[in-house]
Image: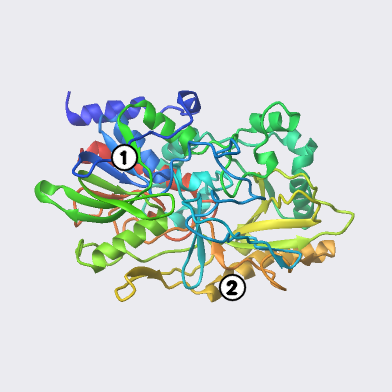
Amino acid sequence: MSQNELSRRGFIAGTGTLLGAAALGVHAPAARAIASGAQVPALVIGTGYGGAVAALRLAQAGVDVHMIEMGMAWDTPGTDGKIFCNTREPDYRSYWLRTRTKAPLNYFLGFPIDRDIPRHTGVLDAEEFGGITVYQGRGVGGGSLVNGGMAVTPKRANFASVLPSVNANEMYDVYYPRANAGLGVGTIDPAWFDSTAYYQYGRVGRKHAQRSNFPFVFVPDVYDWDYMKAEEAGTVPKSALAGEILYGNNHGKKSLQKTYLAQAKATGRVTVSPLHRVTSVAPASGGRYTVTMEQLDTSGNTIATKTVTADRVFFAAGSVGTSKLLVKLKATGVLPNLSGEVSKGWGDNGNVMCGRANHLWDPTGSLQSAIPCCGIDNWAAGGAFAEVAPLPTGIETWASFYLSITNNPHRAQFSWNASANKVELNWQTAWKQPSIDMAKTIFDRINAKEGTIYRTDLFGVYKIWGDHLTYHPLGGAVLNRATDNYGRLTAYPGLYVIDGALIPGNTTVNPFVTITALAERNIEHIIATDL
């Protein structure tokens, strides 16, 4: 059997539904720290959506894979018996190497709510650039550990603006369905939504949207909705209904450890080194690459430096991680022939947050599921889609809270600051104004109809808009510009980008299904043609 036949057979065998993956084990691939001097056929930098897809499909095609992950494995409970801490009580597990929390919503009733914490390799990174804070997951599973799990396929009519060089028919007929199956995507039972106290806030959001003639939609998610019903019934430990979202979810969410990474582990061909940070990827003899990495302890100290040799390297460290590494390697002469498009096309997916103060007779409920399941669609008319988000404080707030995704046109660029020995991003906070204007096309109208006002106590003192952040970093190594149309870094055969860095700044919806589907498309082509 030829290598291509082996690759295709192995790939086809694994492209059915992965919904049963959790039965194979909920943890990530075997954690076995890589040894300095090791030689590996395929090395994947990062264990988020793109990296997990690449590792699984390569392994199914008969290729041994080693994954390098900067964060922890997140498979060992703390002294409280839980792996992750609660959103309302952040502790050492919450943030990546910070001594004070930096919550996206960091004020309540006008008072700051951030608190001091021990420095630790926690699960959520709030990485600060000049004009924006970028939230990213840190650990085996990447962003799947810390997002709300909203698994949205873009409207087909919008796809050309997202990935103009990609065949939409293939994506919607093959790769989006494959990604949704692999991720375990499902939608809330509308009857349960209508009856449970935990989505009263969602029903208020629906009422206000519909009274202002906006389309209200249920949004698919990767949470186990049967588990959530059992949470309400009191037959299983509470997870989403106990406010677990921002710093990880202990039970019901189908993060990558329960889906793609569990399947990858089951192949016996995938291993992972947590708490390892790649610092260099340099050409080596025989068309291979020398990969240099630092091993970290849980305080962030470097305890070892290793070099390994890889036949192929897949950059999957996330939009920011991949872009920063490539920009550094190009600027410092390690990979000088990378395209000049590397560093460009970065965007925030148009993210902006706000809250509305509802009337006393319109409560949103003290009990709130932390998993969002619905939204308000004004994309065609106003350039905004608003997720009806939870505010799981445990008390009645009479507040509706929203994360909007908007059609913001601004794109930023990464650059290497040699004197500071770091990569910088030229985003400007003022570039959020188009996002605010687009979000206002929804909420100004709802406020006028309902006789309500914006909350001014959630992001500072008398500050309406959360315009300082993004949950959805995208771009920096854009498909068919910085790479070829399948993610190859063409000047260096054997180097690939396979994560959100490929997507030019906006997906019109929450991005991880598109990242997953694009990775499925690209790795299928790479396996068929390059191996």
How far apart, in angstroms, are the residues tagged by discs 2 and 1? 45 Å
Residue 75 sits above or below residue 122 on the image = above
* Disc 2, SS: helix
- Left-right relation of 226 to 324: right
Q: Amino acid at mark 1?
A: Ala
Amino acid type for the residue under numbered disc 2 = Gln
Front-most of 90 and 108?
A: 90
Is 17 positioned to the left or the right of 528 in the image? right
Say which residue label 2 marks: 433
Residue at (50% x, 72% y) in the render: 131
Q: Position of residue 218 (x, y in %)?
A: 66, 43
Left or right of 261, for residue 467: right
Residue at x-position 31% and y-position 40%: 33
Q: Quadrant of the N terminus?
A: top left
Q: Secondary structure at mark 1?
A: loop
Is 217 displayed left or right of 508 in the figure? right
Q: Which mark is residue 33?
A: 1
Front residue of 311/291: it is 291
Can you name the residue that lies furthest to the left here?
A: 286
Q: Earlier in the sequence, mark 2 or mark 1?
A: 1
Camera sees residue 503: no
Few, some or many C-alpha atoms within 10 Å of disc 1 (few <14, some 14-19, many ≥20)? some
Task: Kindly identify the residue that appears in the image at 65 percent across and 60 percent down.
Answer: 105
